[in-house]
């Protein structure tokens, strides 16, 4: 029997050809046997033409409408044949080799590292996610897991189910909480594995409150917090959010960037 690839890299993309190319270029850091699965949501910017041109032994792709990013990610996961799965979506990119982590943590269901954060124009912010001082097991106050630096056993799809499509903003957070609550073996490492550029929908201020509300709803669903705790956390978050935005309006950009790099 022919052994399948060690890892399946799954990329979800929609009208982001430049980001997809950057993702593709970064796959050179993968030294083990791998496949690349691209799930395109029906792009009209030349992405399909590029995929036709790029098509090769390691690349498989489909282009069709979907019911959102988590529906598209589930499609990719169902097509994967690698022992491990990594979701590196259009515009995310690897910055170092990670192969050794997969062999060093053979007992893990999930291995998760860190990402370096860049400005939309490609300049480094100096920030890392998750931050060094975060408690990596704390799901209540924050999300301690960076999706582009996370490796999942492919069989988790069958053991714990796929991503839930009814979550629009943080369906990945729901999955982390689901695994954590059911005692999956999660290994946290300090390696900085990939890069993430600001400017996507999850980093835009207009959506921060909606994202946080969905995150608290998930914590309630899994009994990590009560509804009263969620309500109080929401008030505190709104207060800090508006205070922070007020300060950002007053401080010079250079000072803001410095504070972000050390916080």
Image: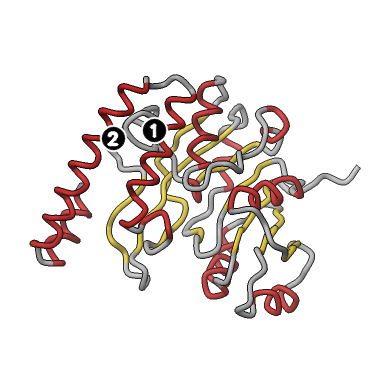
> Element under label 2?
helix
> Element under label 1?
helix
Residue 130 picture location, percent across and down: 36, 43
Is 205 located above or below residue 174 in the figure?
Answer: below
Residue nearest the observer in this picture, 98 or 146: 146
Rendered image quadrant of residue 90: bottom right
- The residue wearing badge 2 is 234
- The residue wearing badge 1 is 216
Q: Residue at x 49, y 46 (%)?
A: 147
Rendered image quadrant of residue 21: bottom right
Residue 238 picture location, percent across and down: 23, 42
Residue nearest the observer in this picture, 60 or 225: 225
Residue 141 picture location, percent across and down: 32, 32
Earlier residue among tags 1 and 2? 1
What crowding class fits label 1: few (fewer than 14 Cα within 10 Å), some (14-19), or many (20 or more)?
many
Residue 15 appears left or right of 236 = right
Residue 110 appears left or right of 123 = right
Model colouring: secondary structure
What crowding class fits label 2: few (fewer than 14 Cα within 10 Å), some (14-19), or many (20 or more)?
some
Residue 51 picture location, percent across and down: 70, 73
Q: Residue at x 36, y 23 (%)?
A: 227
Q: Residue at x 31, y 56 (%)?
A: 205
Res. 13 mark: none
């Amino acid at each position: 029997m022919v052994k399948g690839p060690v890892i399946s890299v799954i990329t979800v993309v929609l009208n982001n050809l430049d980001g997809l190319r950057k993702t593709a270029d970064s796959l050179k850091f993968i030294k083990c046997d791998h496949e690349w699965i691209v799930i395109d949501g029906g792009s009209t910017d030349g992405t399909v033409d590029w995929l036709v041109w790029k098509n090769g032994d390691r690349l498989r792709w489909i282009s069709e409408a979907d019911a959102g990013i988590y529906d598209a990610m589930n499609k990719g996961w169902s097509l994967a044949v690698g022992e491990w799965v990594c979701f590196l979506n259009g515009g995310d990119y690897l910055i170092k080799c990670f192969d050794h982590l997969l062999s060093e943590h053979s007992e893990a269901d999930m291995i998760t590292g860190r990402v370096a954060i860049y400005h939309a124009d490609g300049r480094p912010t100096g920030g890392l996610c998750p931050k060094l001082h975060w408690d990596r097991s704390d799901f209540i106050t924050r999300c301690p897991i960076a999706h582009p630096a996370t490796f999942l056993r492919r069989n988790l799809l069958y053991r714990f189910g796929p991503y839930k499509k009814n979550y629009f903003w943080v369906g990945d957070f729901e999955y982390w909480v689901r695994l954590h609550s059911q005692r999956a073996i999660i290994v946290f490492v300090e390696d900085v594995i990939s890069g993430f550029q600001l400017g996507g929908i999850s980093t835009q201020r207009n959506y921060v409150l909606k994202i946080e509300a969905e995150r608290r709803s998930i914590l309630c669903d899994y009994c990590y917090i009560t509804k009263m705790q969620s309500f109080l956390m929401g008030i505190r978050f709104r207060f800090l959010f508006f205070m922070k935005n007020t300060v950002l309006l007053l401080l010079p950009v250079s000072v803001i960037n410095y504070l972000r790099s050390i916080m």
